[in-house]
Structure formats: C-alpha cells, structure tokens
Image (cartoon, rainbow, N blue to C red):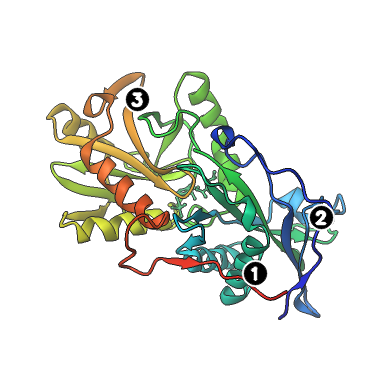
Amino acid sequence: MNIKYNVTTKPQQKPQDESNLGFGKIFTDHMFIINYNPQDGWHNGRIEPLGDLCLHPASPVFHYAQEIFEGAKAYRRPDGQIQTFRLEENCRRMNRSAIRAAMPPLDEDFQYEAIHRLIDLDRDWVPHSEGTSLYLRPTMIADGKSLGANSATEFIYFVICAPSGAYYAGGMKPVRIRIEERYARAVKGGMGSAKTGGNYTASFKATKEAQDAGFDQVLWLDGRTQTCVEEVGAMNMFFVLDGKVVTADLGDTILPGITRKSVIHLAKAKGYTVEERKIPLEELLEAHANGKLQEAFGSGTAAVISPVGELNYDGKPYIINNNEIGPVTMDFYNTLTNIQFAKAEDPYNWTDIVKEYER
Ligand code: PLP
Ligand code: COI
C-alpha cells in the first residue's frame, strides 16, 4: 500500500509560547487518512491537510459508538531529531481493540510507517521545551449509513497530531484521586481492555462529579464485586507496598498500558519485586494504616508517571507520602522520560528515530 501526499499550501502559525500548549488543543497541519470497504479492503491511504471529516448523519459511529483509538507521542531529542516510543505496541493494541470492536485490523507495519511519515512531514511542530511532546492520536471509526444495530461495513482510520504539554494542568505534582464505588467503567467480558470511546463516556459522569468535588480523577474498582482496585480514567495504577511494586493484573477490564508494561520492565531491572495481581481495596487501606502504603502513582502516555498524593474513599482522605512525590515514583519518572527524550541510553530498544522520507 502506498501513501499519497497532498501537502498544504497554507501552513498555520506554530505555537510561539510552548509554556502553555495544554493537552490536545492545538493540531498540526496534516493528517493521515485511509478508508475501508469490503470490496477494496483498506485503500486510498493519504497524508493531506488537516480538515473536517464529512460523514452521513446515519454513520454508525454516531449511533453505536463503533470507535477505537490510540495515544502515543513523538519526542524531540537533544540532537534535534525526533523519536517515537514503543509505537509498534500502539499499532498492535489498535488491532486488538479493532478485533474486540468488530472492526477490520490494519497492517501494523503500515500503521507504523504512516504515523512516522506524518510526523516527518510535520516535524517542525514537535515542540522543544522541557516536558512537551507531539501527542499522536490514531483513530478508527465506523463510516457509511445504516441505522441497523450491526457492525458497520465501511470504516475510516486517521491520525492527527497535537503538540502538547502536561496532561494534568498542575504538571508533575501529586494528584487527588477519588475511589469510585457508585459507578462502574468495565465488567468481565466487556470492552474494558479495548481502547474504545465508550469506556471513556462511561467514566465521564463519575469523573465530572469527582472534579467538581476537587479531585483530579477517579480510581475504578472491579465492576462486579467493587472490592479490588483496577485503574484510573487515563492511567494504570502502581502502589509501592512494603517495598514491593504492585499493580493490578490484566484481564478484560483494564487497559494494557504500554507505560505500565515499561514500568514493570524497569522495576524488574532495578531489582524490585513486582506483583501483578488483584489488589483488594481493604488491603490498601490497611497498608495505609500500618504505614506500608509508601507511594502510589499512575502511568500513561499522556499522564507519564503521575504521583498520587491522596486516595479518597467514602469521603475520607488517605494521604500518601505526605502528599509529596516519593523517591520510587521520581526514579521511574526520570528513568522513563530520560529514555523517551533520549537524555539517556535506551538499553531496551524502545525508541525509533523518525527518518526523512522521500515523498
Ligand atoms: N488506562 C486507561 C483507561 C487509559 O486511557 C490509558 C491511556 O492510554 C492508560 C491506562 C495508559 O495506557 P498507556 O500507557 O498505553 O498510555
Ligand atoms: C493516553 O494516555 O494516550 C490516553 O489515551 C489518555 C487519554 C484518554 C487522554
């Protein structure tokens, strides 16, 4: 499959002030887009000026939320080049989500090349300031026109890019998390491990209520018994429990985070005992009471490593590490971001430089 280029004749002004990019609010000049239908399969892959999509109001994406997406980043290296981090993992997860959502997979090497070509064309948009990056949002939606409650037969895959700063407006500072016991995000056999828009819709009401009450996010409990902690709205959770690094095991209710996988790898390399298992809320609260809950942090592409300063359950605050960034959290943040930004060696081959492609 080849990729056609239609380069804009009207490039936009790039943000002058990188200190206030926000997250996912400014977009680059181009997008990648490719269509699918049963006769031609995936076809007409092209990079073109970023623009609106034109969809029929009966397009199934509007009615049945048949949609999946990914989140990845491109980082500016000290030598001025640009690199991606474990992007092949995002392409693989995209296809796992596609299969769960009854959508057609798109060749992973092709996804990877399309994304690298798009970053290459918009490379001047990758910001330079500390902590900033180019956020990449590959997305697949159902297209066509049919109100029948069945999978669509036509689809669109596209990728847009957003120069971004910190996901949490406060930057790298401990967040306050409410443990959610009234609503559920995912249940066994459902879509929780797929990166599909509906999972986020399911979490918005609880998140808004938590934010209105002064919290940053909610921590979800397992949907069936609501006794074990699972993950946060946009990140996986880690706890430092009596010196061990503990995270919820994967199943069909948790997003298998690429940052999570990287933290587990780093933790083992640093000599920590790592436990991937069910984490009863009761155990966490007891560990807090006994001083054994030493640190908590979230991991995610957008959130990076995000220290948790407070878990709030049933109106009661459980303050962690004095509401300060703990040494283990800081160490993972530094090790991970040093690899992502090429400030340290990449012993695991997780990063790839974006080459200059012929067009
Ligand atoms: N869990 C949820 C629900 C997420 O939205 C994300 C973000 O992508 C993560 C976990 C972390 O995944 P990753 O590290 O691949 O970004
Ligand atoms: C990411 O970290 O890439 C995500 O997808 C989180 C997003 C929902 C803001």
The residue under label 2 is 59
**Do the CB atoms of the residues marked 1 and 3 lie less than 8 Å apart?**
no
Find residue 255 and report its horizontal and vertical position in percent: 45, 53
The residue under label 1 is 114
Residue type pointed to by label 1? Ala
Residues 225 and 166: in front is 166
Q: Is residue 278 left or right of residue 34?
A: left
Q: Is residue 234 above or below residue 312?
A: below
Q: Residues within 10 Å of mark 2 (few under 14, many from 20)?
A: many
Q: Residues within 10 Å of mark 1 (few under 14, many from 20)?
A: many
Residue type pointed to by label 2? Ser
Indicate the secondary structure of the residue bearing disc 1.
helix
Find residue 151 and report its horizontal and vertical position in percent: 71, 63
Find residue 356 and report its horizontal and vertical position in percent: 61, 70
Q: Is residue 22 above or below residue 236?
A: above
Residue type pointed to by label 3? Asn
Closer to the observer: label 1 or label 3?
1
Q: Is residue 227 left or right of residue 146?
A: left
Find residue 276 and report its horizontal and vertical position in percent: 27, 55
Q: Residues within 10 Å of mark 3 (few under 14, many from 20)?
A: some
Closer to the observer: label 1 or label 2?
1
Indicate the secondary structure of the residue bearing disc 2.
loop
Q: Which residue is at the far front?
A: 79
The residue under label 3 is 312
Indicate the secondary structure of the residue bearing disc 3.
strand
Query: What residue appears at the point 68 percent right and 76 percent down from the top-left corner?
Result: 358
Mark 1 or mark 3, earlier in chain? 1
Query: What residue appears at the point 52 percent right and 31 percent down from the top-left corner?
Result: 207
Can residue 130 be seen here? yes
